[in-house]
Structures are given as structure tokens and as C-alpha cells.
Image: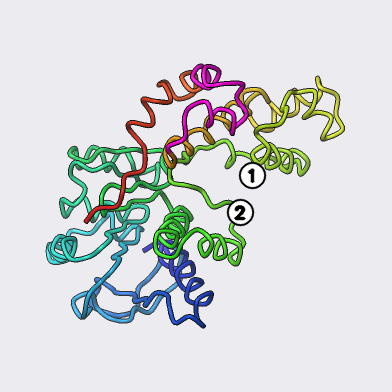
Amino acid sequence: MEELDIVGPWEVFQSVNNALRDEGRGYQLELASTSGRRAVNGDSGLTLIADRHYTAVKGEIDTLIVSGGTGSLRMHNSRVVEWLRRMSGKVRRMVSICTGAFLLAEAGLLNGRRVTTHWRFARTLALRYPLVIMEPDRIYVQDGHVYTSAGVTAGMDLSLALVEEDFGSAIALQVAQALVLFLRRPGGQTQFSAILAAQATEYRSLHELQIWMANNLRKDLSVENLADRVAMSPRNFARVFAREVGVAPARFVGQLRVEAARRGLETSDKGLEEIAGAVGFSGAEAMRRTFRRFIGTLPQTYRERFKRRERTG
């Protein structure tokens, strides 16, 4: 298994327990192994001790999470697959992290569903299980009571989303702050998002500027104003920015605004004009043009396809 696929979500849920200790609310966590022993070897060399074998799990399960790692890619144990298939009809939520999606797919639980996994394995999963509707660049995807996430730290993003479902946004934000998570990313954000690219530059001033840009999309983000914030001439700023980030400043601004618009389209019923204004576009028509240039479709079409579904099952 991939250690962070287990430890990351576990830390998120345990942080909820810490936050709600005085109220007597929270999660009961249990780590189950599919091997014949409780010690589970991690892909990075750490060993975790499971509470019990999966067949010894008793009582009702609210949320069943299948972690990723090389084990889930190699797993061909029909008894494990059948157990997952059987449990799917009993749990409130069935979740996979990273390549854990391969086990859910093997059990037939992803047939006809929108899913994601780590981008490196998305094509393999889609070819191996053609009935799966792959969305390879998503952070996480919910389809009915089945949730799938991209690699490693995306499992923490998904876990925070589950916490928000269970206890509200205030607790989810409190947990994110306690864990000093850089950004609580919604599922609609791409694995290749512009804001993630902001972490790649070695220029501290550019890194801080990009974060500021993401939080101030309604302001004037022209080259001249941005250059002034980092005390550079517009020409030198444009040259350095393009070299360090890989795109021109104007294109980066467009990417940020489109990503923010995508989140608004997926998670709210606000009109196009309101969303456009909230993310810094001059109007809905400007958002449509930029959206089509970056995404290849129109905002309304995108909303119809990706708007977060109400939980079922």
C-alpha cells in the first residue's frame, strides 16, 4: 500500500475527533488488512499494523475506504473482490484513493460511473475496465455513493470533503487549518491546475504573487500591476514569469479564473453573470470565450455535465 493513502485520510478524520472530543461526536476508525497478517508493508518502506483482517470486521460500516499502492494494482484475490462487491450495498459511502480504484473496478462497482485515479494510471484503468467513465484530471469525483480520488494527497482533499458532508464547512476548515494544508481543493480542480503550478517556481516573490493572484481574481491582474507588486519592470516581469511558470502572465490569469469558474459551476446554482463577476471576468460573454479556449466547451454545457450530484444510496 501507499502509506500516505492511509495515514493522510486517517489524520483528517482523527483531527475531527480531536476537534469534537468535548461534544462526543466524530469517527470510529479501523484499519483492516487483506493479507494473512496484521503488519502491512508500505511502498515507501514503512510498516503499519492493521487492527484486524478484513473478514473479522464486525458491525456496520459507514464509509469503506480502499487505499492505493502497488498491492491494489496486483490484487487478484476473488474473495476480497467479492467482499467489496457485497459491502457496497451495505455502506453509506464507498471510497477509493489513487489506484484503489482498480479494486473497485475489478468488483464491477465503477461500471457506468464517473471516476478518477492518479493521472499516471488513468489510461490503464480505462483500458482494463472499458465500462468505467474516466475523468483523468480530476482531484476527486463523486458518483452516487461511490467516491474516487487522484493520487496520495488528493485522498486528504477527498477526506476533507467527506468531513464537510458529515459535520459542515466550519469543521472541515478547522481541520484543514490544524493540518496546515496549503489549499483545500474542491474535486472539480484539475490535477494539473494553475494554482498547483505556483508551487514549482524557485522565485519566492513569484510564488507569493501567484497565491495572491488566486485569492484576488476580481482585481486588476494586468502585467503592469503584477509587475509593480514584485518591483519589476513589466517587460522583465513578463519574461521571468513565462520562463519560471511556463505560460505568459495573461494566460495564467485566464487559467486561474477558469478554474474558479469551474468550481462555481459545479457547486452552486449562481447565474453565469454572477459567477463571471466573482472570478474577475468582465461579464458572462468574456467568461464564455475564455472557458471555450481553455476547456473546449461552454460554461453551461460544463455545468450540466459536472454539477455535483446530490448524494444517493
Q: Which mark is residue 199?
A: 1
Task: Give left or right: position of 100 versus 118.
Answer: left
Q: Nearer the viewer, residue 180 or 1?
A: 180
Q: Which mark is residue 182?
A: 2
Question: Residue 158: image x %, image y %?
Answer: 42, 55
**Circle 2 residues within 10 Å: few <14, some 14–19, many ≥20:** few
Instruction: Say what amino acid the circle numbered 2 marks.
Output: Phe
Q: Nearer the viewer, residue 259 or 49?
A: 259
Question: Residue 82: image x %, image y %?
Answer: 12, 62
Please, what secondary structure does the residue beneath circle 2 have?
loop
Compared with 2, 35 (above or below) is: below
Compared with 175, 209 (above or below) is: above
Q: Quadrant of the C terminus?
A: bottom left
Are the two marked residues, 1 and 2, in contact with CB atoms closer than 8 angstroms?
yes
Instruction: Say what amino acid the circle numbered 1 marks.
Output: Gln
Q: Earlier in the sequence, mark 1 or mark 2?
A: 2
Magenta highlight on residue 287:
yes
Compared with 282, 73 (above or below) is: below
- Magenta residues (range): 269-290
Q: Quadrant of the N terminus?
A: bottom left
Task: Give left or right: position of 178 versus 162.
Answer: right
Q: Give the quadrant of residue 182.
A: bottom right
